[in-house]
Amino acid sequence: MEISEILRYMPKEGDIIMHKDGSYHVVIEDMSKGTMSVKANWHMLGNEPSEVDLNIPKLRTSMIQGNQFLVRKTEDENIEVD
């Protein structure tokens, strides 16, 4: 993602935000207009997932710095796996 794309990033349900340490967040609700946070489940090795609020401006900053990465499922059903 380029910096301009990161600055416009709006979390969608199902997005996964990976961290360098192997932990990750799974977004459980779409971002609504006028809010600066979304609910997500935080997964860390060896622990049960816990629900947290992700602050979007902090998330975008961390993505620009290269500390977090977006993983988004594509809607392309024509992909064949051999």
Image (spheres, rainbow, N blue to C red):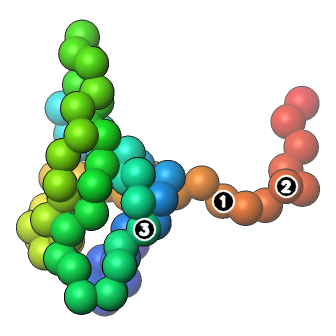
Give the answer, above or below, for where 81 lies relative to 5. above
What residue is shown at x 24% (from left), y 88% (from top)?
A: 34
Relative horizontal placement of residue 81, taking residue 43 as reference (left or right): right
Give the answer, above or below, for where 42 lies relative to 73. above
- In this view, the residue in front, 25 or 2, is 25
The reply to whether residue 63 is visible in this rendering is no
Give the answer, above or below, for where 11 lies relative to 78. below
What residue is shown at x 50% (from left), y 52% (from top)?
A: 14
- Mark 2 lies on a secondary structure that is loop
- For disc 3, the marked residue is 30
- In this view, the residue in front, 39 or 2, is 39
Q: Residues within 10 Å of mark 2 (few under 14, many from 20)?
A: few
- For disc 2, the marked residue is 77
Q: Are marks 2 and 3 in contact (CB under 8 Å)?
A: no
Amino acid marked by disc 1: Thr
What residue is shown at x 28% (from left), y 55% (from top)?
A: 39
Q: Locate the C terminus by quadrant.
A: top right
Relative horizontal placement of residue 79, taking residue 50 as reference (left or right): right
Amino acid marked by disc 3: Asp
Image coordinates for residue 64, horizontal then vertical, percent: 18, 70
- Mark 3 lies on a secondary structure that is loop
The CA distance from mark 2 to mark 3 is 22 Å
Image coordinates for residue 74, horizontal then vertical, percent: 66, 59
What numbered label is drawn on residue 36?
A: none
Q: Residues within 10 Å of mark 1 (few under 14, many from 20)?
A: few
The CA distance from mark 3 to mark 1 is 16 Å
What residue is shown at x 42% (from left), y 68% (from top)?
A: 30
